[in-house]
Amino acid sequence: MTKEMEFFTFLMEQYAYYKNTTADKILHQLDELNLTDYVFGMYEMYHCEAIENAFEDIDKLIESKAK
């Protein structure tokens, strides 16, 4: 498993916990909004900052696409 995939898995699990849901549901939501590849590609930024910043960014991405 690549370091990017390992971090993405960790991020999905932690974000799901933050949202009080499951990683599977989060991934499904990202897939529906065509955001999965984008979030995965943000490894360089997300892995070097506070994870709460990534959560905030993902919240904003979902909000902007869900409109």
Image (spheres, rainbow, N blue to C red):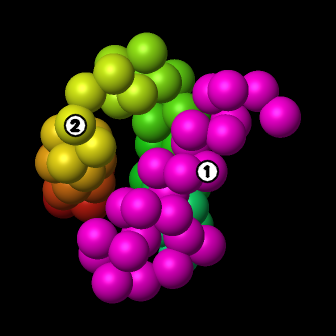
Residue 29 in sight: no
In the drawing, what numbered circle is on residue 42?
none
Residue 46's place in the image compared with 35, above or below, is: above
Residue sitting at x 57%, y 42%: 8
Q: Nearer the viewer, residue 61 or 24?
A: 24
Is 52 displayed left or right of 1 in the figure? left
Q: Quadrant of the N terminus?
A: top right
Residue 30 placed where, x, y %? 48, 55
In the drawing, what numbered circle is on residue 9?
1
Instruction: Classify residue 2 by image quadrant.
Output: top right
- Residue with the mark numbered 2: 50
**Residue 7 among those drawn in magenta:** yes
Q: Nearer the viewer, residue 62 or 55?
A: 55
The magenta region covers 1-24
Residue sitting at x 25%, y 27%: 49
Q: CA distance from mark 2 to mark 1?
A: 16 Å
